[in-house]
Protein backbone atom coordinates (compact mmCIF):
# COMPACT_ATOMS: atom_id res chain seq x y z
CA UNK A 1 0.00 0.00 0.00
CA UNK A 2 1.27 3.48 -0.91
CA UNK A 3 1.83 5.67 2.16
CA UNK A 4 0.92 9.18 1.01
CA UNK A 5 1.90 10.63 4.39
CA UNK A 6 5.50 9.43 4.25
CA UNK A 7 8.33 11.88 3.62
CA UNK A 8 9.29 12.02 -0.05
CA UNK A 9 5.71 11.50 -1.22
CA UNK A 10 5.10 15.17 -2.04
CA UNK A 11 3.77 14.35 -5.51
CA UNK A 12 1.05 12.01 -4.20
CA UNK A 13 -2.23 13.76 -3.31
CA UNK A 14 -3.43 13.60 0.28
CA UNK A 15 -7.09 13.57 1.26
CA UNK A 16 -9.08 16.64 2.15
CA UNK A 17 -9.24 15.90 5.90
CA UNK A 18 -5.43 15.57 6.11
CA UNK A 19 -4.94 18.71 4.03
CA UNK A 20 -7.29 20.72 6.25
CA UNK A 21 -5.73 19.38 9.46
CA UNK A 22 -2.24 20.30 8.24
CA UNK A 23 -3.56 23.74 7.30
CA UNK A 24 -5.08 24.18 10.77
CA UNK A 25 -1.77 23.26 12.41
CA UNK A 26 0.29 25.54 10.16
CA UNK A 27 -0.58 28.63 12.21
CA UNK A 28 0.14 27.26 15.69
CA UNK A 29 -0.08 24.08 17.79
CA UNK A 30 -3.65 23.02 18.53
CA UNK A 31 -5.48 20.35 20.49
CA UNK A 32 -8.08 18.10 18.86
CA UNK A 33 -11.20 20.17 19.48
CA UNK A 34 -9.42 23.34 18.30
CA UNK A 35 -8.41 21.51 15.10
CA UNK A 36 -12.05 20.51 14.50
CA UNK A 37 -13.18 24.12 14.97
CA UNK A 38 -10.41 25.53 12.78
CA UNK A 39 -11.12 23.04 9.97
CA UNK A 40 -14.77 24.11 10.08
CA UNK A 41 -13.66 27.75 9.78
CA UNK A 42 -11.06 27.10 7.04
CA UNK A 43 -13.62 25.18 4.98
CA UNK A 44 -16.24 27.90 5.28
CA UNK A 45 -18.44 25.59 7.34
CA UNK A 46 -18.37 22.84 4.72
CA UNK A 47 -16.23 20.27 6.56
CA UNK A 48 -16.98 19.15 10.12
CA UNK A 49 -14.57 16.43 11.16
CA UNK A 50 -15.87 13.69 13.41
CA UNK A 51 -13.56 12.81 16.28
CA UNK A 52 -12.91 9.33 14.88
CA UNK A 53 -11.80 10.80 11.55
CA UNK A 54 -9.71 13.46 13.26
CA UNK A 55 -7.76 11.08 15.47
CA UNK A 56 -7.20 8.45 12.79
CA UNK A 57 -5.80 11.12 10.45
CA UNK A 58 -3.72 12.64 13.26
CA UNK A 59 -2.25 9.19 13.96
CA UNK A 60 -1.34 8.71 10.28
CA UNK A 61 0.16 12.19 10.06
CA UNK A 62 2.25 11.48 13.18
CA UNK A 63 3.41 8.13 11.82
CA UNK A 64 4.40 9.85 8.57
CA UNK A 65 6.39 12.49 10.45
CA UNK A 66 4.22 15.39 9.25
CA UNK A 67 3.07 16.37 12.74
CA UNK A 68 4.24 15.72 16.28
CA UNK A 69 2.98 16.23 19.81
CA UNK A 70 3.85 19.74 20.98
CA UNK A 71 2.74 19.34 24.59
CA UNK A 72 0.16 17.75 26.85
CA UNK A 73 -1.79 19.30 29.69
CA UNK A 74 -4.60 18.32 32.01
CA UNK A 75 -7.74 20.46 31.70
CA UNK A 76 -10.78 19.64 33.83
CA UNK A 77 -9.23 16.26 34.71
CA UNK A 78 -8.82 15.37 31.02
CA UNK A 79 -5.67 15.08 28.95
CA UNK A 80 -5.39 17.70 26.23
CA UNK A 81 -2.72 16.90 23.62
CA UNK A 82 -1.47 19.67 21.35
CA UNK A 83 -0.10 18.85 17.89
CA UNK A 84 2.21 20.88 15.69
CA UNK A 85 3.45 20.73 12.12
CA UNK A 86 6.98 19.42 11.55
CA UNK A 87 9.35 20.71 8.87
CA UNK A 88 8.38 17.70 6.75
CA UNK A 89 4.71 18.54 7.32
CA UNK A 90 5.26 22.14 6.31
CA UNK A 91 6.97 21.06 3.09
CA UNK A 92 4.21 18.51 2.39
CA UNK A 93 1.48 21.11 2.93
CA UNK A 94 3.27 23.57 0.64
CA UNK A 95 3.64 20.92 -2.08
CA UNK A 96 0.00 19.85 -1.81
CA UNK A 97 -1.16 23.49 -1.85
CA UNK A 98 0.83 24.10 -5.05
CA UNK A 99 -0.60 20.94 -6.64
CA UNK A 100 -4.17 21.97 -5.78
CA UNK A 101 -3.54 25.49 -7.11
CA UNK A 102 -2.28 24.09 -10.44
CA UNK A 103 -5.36 21.88 -10.71
CA UNK A 104 -7.70 24.75 -9.84
CA UNK A 105 -5.97 27.05 -12.35
CA UNK A 106 -6.34 24.38 -15.06
CA UNK A 107 -10.03 23.97 -14.26
CA UNK A 108 -10.65 27.73 -14.32
CA UNK A 109 -8.77 28.09 -17.62
CA UNK A 110 -10.93 25.41 -19.21
CA UNK A 111 -14.10 26.90 -17.77
CA UNK A 112 -13.27 30.31 -19.24
CA UNK A 113 -14.20 28.97 -22.69
CA UNK A 114 -17.28 27.13 -21.45
CA UNK A 115 -20.69 28.71 -21.88
CA UNK A 116 -24.17 27.46 -21.15
CA UNK A 117 -26.97 27.82 -23.65
CA UNK A 118 -29.39 30.34 -22.16
CA UNK A 119 -32.24 28.76 -20.26
CA UNK A 120 -31.14 25.14 -20.74
CA UNK A 121 -28.30 24.56 -18.30
CA UNK A 122 -26.59 22.61 -21.10
CA UNK A 123 -23.42 23.41 -22.99
Image (cartoon, grey):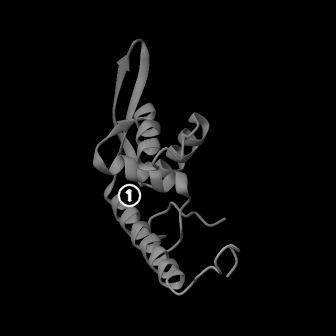
Instruction: Farthest residue to the left: give it.
Output: 28
Q: Residues within 10 Å of mark 1 (few under 14, many from 20)?
A: many
1 w.r.t. 54: above or below: below
Q: Is residue 61 above or below residue 106?
A: above
Residue closest to the far top:
77
> Where residue 63 appears, x then y in whole percent?
50, 51
Q: Residue at x 52, y 78 (%)?
A: 107
User: Toward which corner of the image does residue 82 lie, by quadrant?
Assistant: top left
Out of 118 and 24, give the one closest to the viewer. 118
| Residue at the (54%, 39%) spot, across then down | 55
Q: Quadrant of the N terminus?
A: bottom right
Q: Using the image as rendered, state which of residue 38 and residue 10 is in the foreground.
A: 38
Count of labels in the image = 1
Across and down, in percent, residue 96 comes to 44, 67
Q: Residue at x 49, y 81 (%)?
A: 106
At x 41% / y 55%, what residue is drawn?
66
Element type at mark 1: helix
Picture coordinates of residue 31 (x, y %)? 39, 34
Assign the C terminus to one quadrant of the image: bottom right
Please state the horizontal and vertical placement of residue 77, each as a whole percent of the image: 42, 12
Residue with the mark numbered 1: 89
- In the orientation shown, which residue stands out farthest toward the bottom? 113
Amino acid sequence: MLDVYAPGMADVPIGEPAFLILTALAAEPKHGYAVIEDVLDISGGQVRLHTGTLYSVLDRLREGGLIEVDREEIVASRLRRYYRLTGVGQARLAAESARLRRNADAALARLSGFSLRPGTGAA
